[in-house]
Amino acid sequence: MEGRRAVGPRLRDHPGFAPELLALAAVDALGPRASAWVEQVRRAYPEADADGVARLAARRFVRMAGTGGALAAGAGLFAPVAELATVLWTQANLVLHLAAAYGRDPAHPDRAAELLVLTLVHPDDGTARAALAAARAAGAPAEGPWGRVAEAAWRLATPVAAQAGGWLGLRLAARLLPGAAALAAATGGTATAERVAARAVARYRPTRARSTPGGRGDVG
């Protein structure tokens, strides 16, 4: 959470780059933690293969995605921005842990572009790298605090809408049914995280690392 808070002022100044700024902050803040977590798991389960470590990471962060979405749903007026930032931050944690499980350095700058592709912010690595370069070079802040909030919400909502398809519908249903906001956010967050995990495993998992379900590589 500290890394996400640290990027807050720059995100408010440059809401048009909200997903890119979150991706950069996630790699810096969460990458080293992902490496340490994978090393700890491998010490605890020396017989586990990469698939087993990846499954453990996926279970952990898919569960967290549901919980985080439910908590953010109670954020009041700024719930959309808070909820979406929480969703994308948890997805970043998931992707970086899966990258580490398959031997990629989760703190490497390349992970930021890959993260933006895997969460459907950008269609390919080249586009993502160009957007990251623009985010790093962004100068004077955008004008108007309320406009910034709206722009940040729009940029953050775009990938989540592409991933889940029904986020806006869930928010509308939550308005009509008291108490439904947390349930809708938890359900949508879990399903979306599962899809992000599948894309990350497909990208990072070497062909030789494949193992049969329920095999020796299972952990936990």
Image (cartoon, helix red, strand yellow):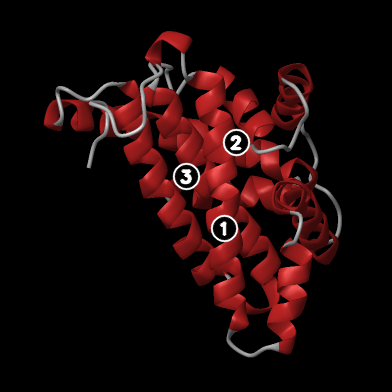
Q: In this rendering, which labeled residue sits more in front, label 3 or label 2?
A: 2
Q: Quadrant of residue 129?
A: top right
- Quick one: label 1, few (<14), some, or many (20+) residues within 10 Å? many
Q: Is residue 156 visible?
A: yes
Decide which of tag 3 and tag 2 comes sooner along the chain: 3
Residue 126 in the image: x percent, y percent?
A: 76, 16
Name the residue at 54% across, 30% down: 200
Which amino acid type is marked by label 2?
Ala
Q: Do the numbered discs 3 and 1 sit on residues whose CB atoms are within 8 Å?
A: no
User: How many C-alpha atoms fall within 10 Å of the one at disc 2: few (<14), some, or many (≥20)?
Assistant: many
Of 159 and 154, the residue lying toward us: 159
First in sequence: mark 3 or mark 1?
A: 3
Q: Is residue 103 above or below residue 139?
A: above
2 or 1: mark nearer the eye: 1
Q: Which residue is mark 1?
A: 189
Q: Amino acid at mark 3?
A: Gly
Secondary structure under badge 3?
A: helix
Dot 2 and dot 1 residues touching (CB under 8 Å) = no
Mark 3 lies on residue: 3
Give the answer, above or below, for where 108 lies relative to 76.
Answer: above
Could one spot residue 75 in this view of the protein? no
Q: Is residue 46 left or right of residue 148?
A: left
Give the vertical position of 206 relative to 94 (above or below): above
Residue 136 location (% of width, % of height): 69, 28
Q: Badges 3 and 2: C-beta atoms under 8 Å apart?
A: no
**If the image is split into quadrants, where does the C terminus sit?**
top left
